[in-house]
Amino acid sequence: MEVTIATWVVGIAGLVLIVLLGGLQLVAVARPRSTWTIENVYGGSPDATDPKAYFAFNQGYAWADAIFWTPMQIAGSTGMILGYRWGFLLALVASVPFWYTAIPIFIWDRDLGFRKNTFTYWVVIWGIFPAFGIVEGVYCFVRLLE
């Protein structure tokens, strides 16, 4: 498939976002109950809710991101940039967790009081992931229809 400037932008953005997220989630897999992980990866506090549920929720996402989603997004973005049809297909599939997981995290953050009405929360912490997922999904779907 033809590699356009938009392909490069979507592919590189996917790599940057997933390497950042995957790296943080690898830390969470390696040190799931460390203070740094709680403050910088999970957010909130296990004391604000049932600690068992808090760690189960966050560690589930950490493992899923580290062993499933990160490799798929890396392969998809790389395949797109190299112009392979399978790359666009994998990137389309990998776009789903960007917006899908944002929904339960949004509800979790709201119900546990983690969400803050700030630019940082809405754009950097939460908003960039579903926005990118929708853009990547639509872009890959349209390109696969060509």
Image: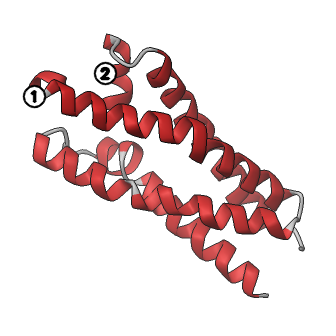
* Residue 17, above or below 79: above
Q: For the point 71% across and 46% down, which residue is it?
A: 74
Asked whether the viewer can see residue 56, the reply is yes
Label 1 sits on a secondary structure element that is helix
Q: In screen coordinates, is 99 left or right of 66?
A: left
Instruction: Give the camera-side residue of 31 and 124.
Output: 31
Q: Residue furthest bottom?
A: 146
Q: Position of residue 116 (x, y in %)?
A: 19, 42
Q: CA distance from mark 2 to mark 1?
A: 12 Å
Q: Position of residue 107 (x, y in %)?
A: 21, 53
Q: Quadrant of residue 26?
A: top right
Kindly check if marks 2 and 1 are in contact, taking CB atoms under 8 A apart as contact. no
Q: In screen coordinates, is 143 left or right of 106?
A: right
The amino acid type, in three-letter code, at marker 2 is Ile
The amino acid type, in three-letter code, at marker 1 is Ala
Please tell me the numbered disc located at residue 39: none
Q: For the point 48% across and 56% down, which residue is it?
A: 98
* Residue 100, above or below 61: below
Sequence-first disc among 2 and 1 = 2
Residue denoted by label 2: 38
Mark 2, residues whose alpha carbon is within 10 Å: few (<14), some, or many (≥20)?
some
Q: For the point 59% across and 44% down, which residue is it?
A: 68
